[in-house]
Amino acid sequence: AVTVEASFKYSTSSLQQAIVTNIVKDNLKSSDTSILELIVSRDEVTAKAKATGSSNVSVSANGRDLGLTTVTTGSTPVGVEDIKLEVVTGIAFSSDLTDPSGGSDNKQTAKASVQRELGYEGDKATVLASAVFKDGAQLSIYKADGLSLTSSKPSILEVDASKNETVIVRGSGKGPFLTANWTDQCDKTEIVTGSFFVDITLRQPDKATVSLKSDTLVVKDDPATKLSYVDKTSITVKLVYQGGTREIDFTRDSRTVVTLSRTDLITVSGGDVVANANGTTGTATITVSFSHESVTAATTVTVIKSTGLLTQLKTFTGGNVG
């Protein structure tokens, strides 16, 4: 892989460095493409040796060279000895504003930190894979290059079927569950394989919540449903973590257990609470528990029915009709 690093400074500040490969990648060139070819992709720039010899790799702008390095190629291939994996959940940015007044010498340092914590069920993370060569060089590899990921414990860490380079947390556990395999795209032979040690401890929920869109229903097919009353409402079940800073919907999770105090009044199916059609009225308690957690929650729903049509007759006095 080709990395371009720029050195700069503002005013009297010390020299700063930054990786600018993606910014200048279209301005990179090899002085002898018969020896060294530069391959520019969306994510990186790679150098491919075509023959033995030396070639200058330079970056230019407005006809002026900004940087140059010499690359020497040899005839002895360098083998791959390992795959390095890194699981990343996100990137957090912060800044240090040294002059809040905003003068001409205003300085602000942006800091980026990689987040790797997997603490909640359903958390997703991107797996960054690099092939490690025997000379110490590393090359980022992706699904398009022949990378595949598998998990020996999908109940703890699952590989996202829709995106090979993404994993999903399913439970707590630790061990070398995640395996990466790099296969040659031409002859389909294995180049290298490696494992990643996973150590996941899921946070425990503080509590559970259960809520209804409407806590009053009319019996099924009651005439009042033609007005503003309903015989069915939605139910939402959540587990709450970290003092309410994180909530996970468990409404349709197979481990959510729903218990009804009165099955003659209502039924619960999927995400709906439906009033029965037997005409019975009253109040039922809905309790939710979980096969994998100890917290519970409850709410009530009342079922009513219409008793007739009320007609009001208004009379007018003091005037003539006609």
Image: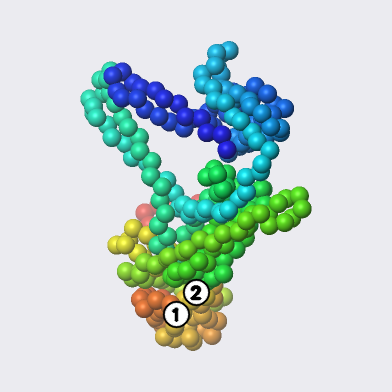
User: As shown in the figure, which amino acid type bears the numbered disc 2?
Assistant: Val
Residue 52 in picture, x, y percent from top left: 69, 32
Tell which tag, 2 or 1, sits nearer the viewer: 1
User: As shown in the figure, which amino acid type bears the numbered disc 1?
Assistant: Ser
Residue drawn where x is 57% and y is 22% of the image: 58
Front in this rendered view, residue 296 or 4: 4
Report how far apart the C-alphas of labels 2 and 1 lie in the structure: 21 Å
- Residue lying farthest top? 63
Q: Is residue 186 left or right of residue 241?
A: right
Residue 150: tell me if it is visible.
yes
Residue drawn where x is 57% and y is 47% of the image: 133
Q: Mark on residue 291?
A: 1
Say what secondary structure mark 1 lies in.
Answer: loop
Q: Mark on residue 273?
A: 2
Residue drawn where x is 66% and y is 41% of the image: 76
- Count of number-bearing discs: 2
Say what secondary structure mark 2 lies in.
Answer: strand
| Label 2: how many Cα within 10 Å (few below 14, some 14–19, many 20+) | many
Q: First in sequence: mark 2 or mark 1?
A: 2
Disc 2 + disc 1, Cβ < 8 Å: no
Q: Quadrant of the N terminus?
A: top right
Residue 315: tell me if it is visible.
no
Up-down relation of residue 239 to residue 127 (above or below)? below
Front in this rendered view, residue 62 or 279: 62
Residue 251 in picture, x, y percent from top left: 48, 69
Front in this rendered view, residue 77 or 158: 77
- Residue lying farthest right? 187
